[in-house]
Amino acid sequence: MRSADTTFVSRESRNALTDKQQEKSPPLCPDFVIELIWDADRPKSDSLTDTKEKMLIDWMANGCQLGWLIDPFSQMVHIYRADGSIQINRTFSTPLSGENVLPGLAFDLSELVAWTRCLFATSIRLVNRSRQSGKAKS
């Protein structure tokens, strides 16, 4: 099984493992996963398609209860649930909820938007500097 960007394993799931299994990377599927779309080097549709497939095949099909696939650049979230439903939020205006998996968890995506804008602006500056540096050497 591949790894996710962020995972949560409930106490009940963890306690079901032997002491030896708990010492290493446990052989179980997390109860909750977060996947982020960050791959700027590949076409956006490929990265999104690959990550959707990973969410369905690696996580939900193996017993994950809740999954968030977050695309900070397009401000879209795919929310995967154990019942097979997938909810798509096309805006970051509504905080995400941990639902029955992590009651009380609320994630305000507007914080991620601000951070993403800062990251994007920094990337643009680095690319521009690199281009200017390349012209100076010519």
Image (cartoon, rainbow, N blue to C red):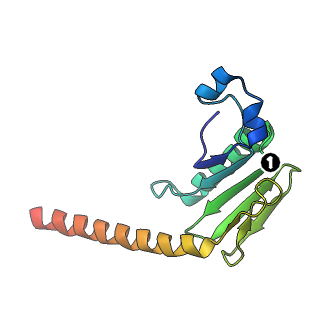
Q: Residue furthest top?
A: 20
Quarter occupied by the N terminus: top right
**In what element is the residue under mark 1?**
loop
| 3 w.r.t. 77: above or below | above
Q: Nearer the viewer, residue 33 or 55?
A: 33
Give the residue furthest to the left. 137
Quarter of the image with the C terminus is: bottom left
Q: Residue at x 67, y 44 (%)?
A: 54
- Residue 89 seen in this snapshot: yes
Q: Hey, which residue is sitting farthest right in the picture?
A: 83
Does residue 138 appear in the picture of this structure? no
Along the viewing direction, whichever of 83 and 105 lies nearer the viewer: 105
Left of 102 or right of it: where is 6?
Answer: left
Above or below, 30 relative to 78: above
- Residue occupied by mark 1: 65
Q: Position of residue 21 (x, y in %)?
A: 66, 24
Locate residue 100 relative to residue 54 in the image: left or right.
right
Measured from the top left, where is residue 82 in percent x and y? 84, 49
Rendering quarter of residue 56? top right
Q: Amino acid at mark 1?
A: Gln
Answer with the quarter of the image where residue 17 lies: top right
Numbered label tally: 1
Name the residue at 76% across, 36% down.
13
Residue 92 in the image, given as x and y percentages of width and height? 66, 74
Local packing at callout 1 (Cα closer than 10 Å; few below 14, some 14-19, many 20+) is many
- Residue pictured at 39% horizontal, 74% vertical: 121
